[in-house]
Structures are given as structure tokens and as C-alpha cells.
Image: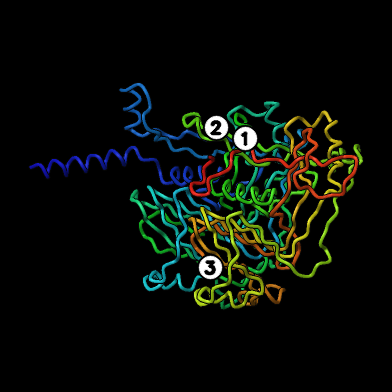
Amino acid sequence: MFSSVLHILQRLLHSLQSIMAPTSERVFADLIAHATHKYPNWDPEIPIMPGDYGRITSGQRGPLDTLLNGRMGRRRRPSRSGTFLKEGNIFTEGLAEKYNIPPPVEYGAESTQGTTWITSRNAEQVTWNADIAGQHPGLAECSIKASFRFTTGQGAVLAMDNDTVLAIDPPAKLLRLLSDKALPEDTVIVSEVHRCSSYARFLSSSYNQNTSVTLGLKVQPLPVPLPGPTGSPSSPSFNDQQNMNDNMGQMVPGWANVEGKWVHDSTAGNFRAKHPIFAQRTASRGLATLMPTSERLFVDLIVRSSHKYPNWDPEVSVEPGDYGRTTQGRQFRIAFWKKRVGTFIKEGNIYDDGLAEKYQIPKPVEHGLDSTEGTTWVTSKNAQQVNFDADVGLQTPAFAECSVKATFKFNTNKGAVLAMDNDTILTINPPGKLRRLLAEKALEKGYVIVSEVHRCSSYARFLSAAAGATVALGLAAQPPVGNVGSANVDAKWVHSSSAGNFKAKVNKEGKRVFYPLFRLVALKESAVSTGLRGELDEDPPLPDAEPPWDPVDGETGNSN
């Protein structure tokens, strides 16, 4: 009798949870947005473009939600499911021209390597299990694959292969439109869009701990080449909506003769594979953004060791003379003890705005153009370079083809590595000339300026998932897939550890189109220099800009 009643209660509880549970789309969007502060597109085939504006609809209420509101006077659990409802585009309607907002710029179009993995905060990348290959032979044939374990509740993964970033640069220009209230207060604007040649998304169906999934991309030559463009896609035109939609369908160079297919090992989840993630800025919140945990920890580890800021998306250009603010972001109202976090928000450039000419600040000088070899390794303070282990070469045969490789062990807590191949340094020399900008009233107190930028033709970054980890990174040269494209040899970054956040891209023509590292100086009175380069003159250098948060705990990823 008791067991029958318990069974009935369990079924009733399950039914109530089903009624109260939000839709899969809402759960997926919520998990990705909280991890990255960017919104995933549930139907990536539907184009989203920078400058699109509209509202986030609140959706319909479920029957239990109506009951709770009607009977109990307040909503106890969020059960509405909403989505972005586009109402127009500031470029097609003339608002961008009216408020002098520049057209979007596409970054990363010439890179040949790179799969961007976006995960929920509870996802931990783990070592790929070879036993999975026996159960799912298709994964063994995948050139790109990754395994993730969700430590608590449901988890989400979004993979974008060969993606580029379309961004309104600088994004602070949108403030002109928002501050003038040209749009209603609750309007949101798309400021950045990721486009890709293929994507896969996965949402686990289980609320249990330690559920896992492996995703892989299998690329192979087609028996008969498909007709299609193989040249570099041109920058999209934003003169009319048709041009924007046409550009969304452009093929990535070199992919006309190959076939790609995403595979996965889990049947217990929502899976789809076939330009998918976009960042929004609202009129009510302005430009306050919340950095995801991984990005914040990586930035903190590199800044504390090098006094330079890593660019989480190196495809997005950073130039000497860029100025703006390091925002403190949004503070949690409930968890008021947590520190605010932020990032550099560009508002302009002293050379484009005429300030450099006004104050006789010299143009940047590029150093290292004549060098023929060299990979710059930047690591966190707890990283120790160790000898390359031959066993790693057996587990990852691609290391045998690497002309550049290094192994690092993180002695305490989590660690970070940034590798830049064939890099040069653009500097404002002497940097003390920037002190003259203190007299400019248009540059308010709290502004920071980029005084130095590293540019490179390929990069790799790695953030360990656990303390005491060891990782080997290498740059390998290999023939392109299916001999597609005009280049004779492709380069590819490889790494030995799958338990961490890894991203790498390569420009096949050797052009320095990535901006992984830059130095920020603060516009404030100080006679103390903290490491800026440049000859001594009558103008002492400005101090380095400090991150607007306390040092991050390398174990937890939180501020101390």
C-alpha cells in the first residue's frame, strides 16, 4: 500500500515538474547566455545581423504558473519561455547613419583552423575515452572532437566550426543611439554575430550529476566536387536587407569539395547539427557586461604575470590608440558580496578622432617585421616549462610533425598558456607622449588607452580545468584535407590535454590578422612607470591599467 502511494506521488511530482519546466530552447539559451553573455540562435539557419533590434518576448505562461500567480499572489518559479523578436535594423532604416554608427566589421575570415566550443558553466572538458570509439565508430574518424561532463543538472554545448565574428566596432558607438532614446527603453540591439560553416548544439536531458557527451566533426572529400565559390568571402554589404541575407549564405573558402558531418555519442538529449550566437546590448543596461568565468580567469592569470591583457577573441582587432573603459559590469543584487567583473570596451581611437594629431602623438611603430622565426609563449605565474614527454607523442602522433612545441606544468591551482607564432609588436613610441592626453577634456577620468599590441599569424590559448595539470602544445604542418585550396601546406595547433579550455586559429597565408595580447595604460596622473617600453623623455609614461577586480582564485575562478 505504502509503495503504491509513493509511486503515485512520484508520478505526480514528475508531472508537476514537467508542467513547470521551461522549454528546451529556453533552457539552452539560459545556460549559454549565463556562461558567455551572448545569446544562442535556436534556429541558426535564420539570419541574425549586427544592428538588428527588437524585444525579448516573455512568452506564454503555463497552467501551473497561472495557478500560482492567481492563487498565491506571486510567481514562484519562472516558467515563461521567450525569444528575440526582431523589429528592424539600424543600418537599413538609416538610424546608423543618423547617429554616425560605423558598419560592422568581419574578423577571422582568413583563418583556416578553429572550432569554437561554447559550454554551460557546469561543463568540464574531459579526456576522450577510446571505448566510445567501439560503441560509436564514427567518432574515431573525426578530426575534431571533444568530450564534456556536466557536473550538476542539465548542460549545454554549442560548437561552431570555422567561425568568424561580425561586430560593430567600437560597440560604445551604440550609446549615441541608446542615450538619445531613439528606440524604446526595453529594446535590445545585436552588436555582434558569430557566423560559421557548420555547427552542432547539444542539451542534455538528464538532471543527474556527471552525465557526459562527446561531439565530433567528420570531414572527408566528396566523390564529385560540388560547384561553389572557393575564394575569400567579401565583406558583407549593409546597404539593404537582401545583401545581408545573401552574405549569410556565402561558403567558406576551400570547403566546396569536402563534406562535413557532426556525430555524437549520447541519445539522451536534444541534438541538432547543420550563424549561431549573438551578443545583445540593451537600452536599459547600456554596455555593462558580465565576463564568463573561464574568460575572467584566463585574463586575470595572464595580466598578473605579464601586465598585458589577453584578447579572448583574438580575431577582433585591437589597435594602438584605441581608448575606452574597463567596465566593472553588473553586480549581483542577491550575492552582493561577489566582486564586479568587466572587460575593455572600446569607444574610439585617438588617430581616427584627430586627438593624436592635436597633441602631436607619433604613429605606432611595428617591431619584429624582419624576424623569420619565433613563437612567443606567455604563461601564468604558476607555469613551469618541462621536458616533452615521449609518451605524449605516442598518445598524440601529430606532435611528431610539430616544428614548434612546448610542455608546461602548473604547480598550483589552474594555469594559462598563450602562444603567438610569428608575432610582431605595434607600440606608441615613446609611450610618455600619451600623457599629453590628460589635458583633453573629452577623455573623461577613468579612460584607458591601448599603447601596445601583439599581432600574429596564428595563436593558441589554453586554460587548465584542474590544478596541477600538465599540457603540451605544438604547431604542426600537414597537407590540407582533400588537397583543397591553393595553399600547399596547412598548419594546425595540437595539444595533449582535453581537460581544459583550448582555442587555436591559423591564417593559411601567414598574414598577421590576430590580436591576442595588448597593453592598457590608465589616463591618470602618476609619475610611476610599471613596465612600459620607450625612451625616457620629458613625459614620463602613464601607469598600466589594473583589472577592475580583485585577483582571481586559480582554484575556484572567483575573486578573493
Q: In this view, does 490 lie above or below 521?
A: below
Q: Is residue 101 left or right of residue 114?
A: right
Q: Is mark 2 on a helix, strand or loop?
A: loop
Three-letter amino acid code at disc 3?
Answer: Ser
CB of mark 3 within 8 Å of CB of mark 1? no
List the residue tagged with mark 3. 496
Which quadrant, please, contains the N terminus?
Answer: top left
Q: Is residue 35 visible in the rendered structure shown here?
A: yes
Q: Nearer the N terminus, badge 3 or badge 1?
A: 1
Is residue 135 or residue 528 the one in the foreground? 528
Query: What residue sits 41% from the left and 59% below the top?
Result: 213
List the residue tagged with mark 2. 331
CB of mark 1 within 8 Å of CB of mark 2? yes
Three-letter amino acid code at disc 1?
Answer: Gln
Q: Is mark 1 on a helix, strand or loop?
A: loop
Mark 1 neighbour class, 10 Å CA radius: few under 14, some 14 to 19, many 20 or more: some
Marker count (numbered): 3
Q: Nearer the N terminus, badge 3 or badge 2?
A: 2
CB of mark 3 within 8 Å of CB of mark 2? no
**Cα gap from disc 1 to disc 2, whole angstroms:** 8 Å
Query: Residue 450: where, in percent of width, then height?
Result: 76, 45
List the residue tagged with mark 1. 328
Q: Is residue 227 visible in the rendered structure shown here?
A: no
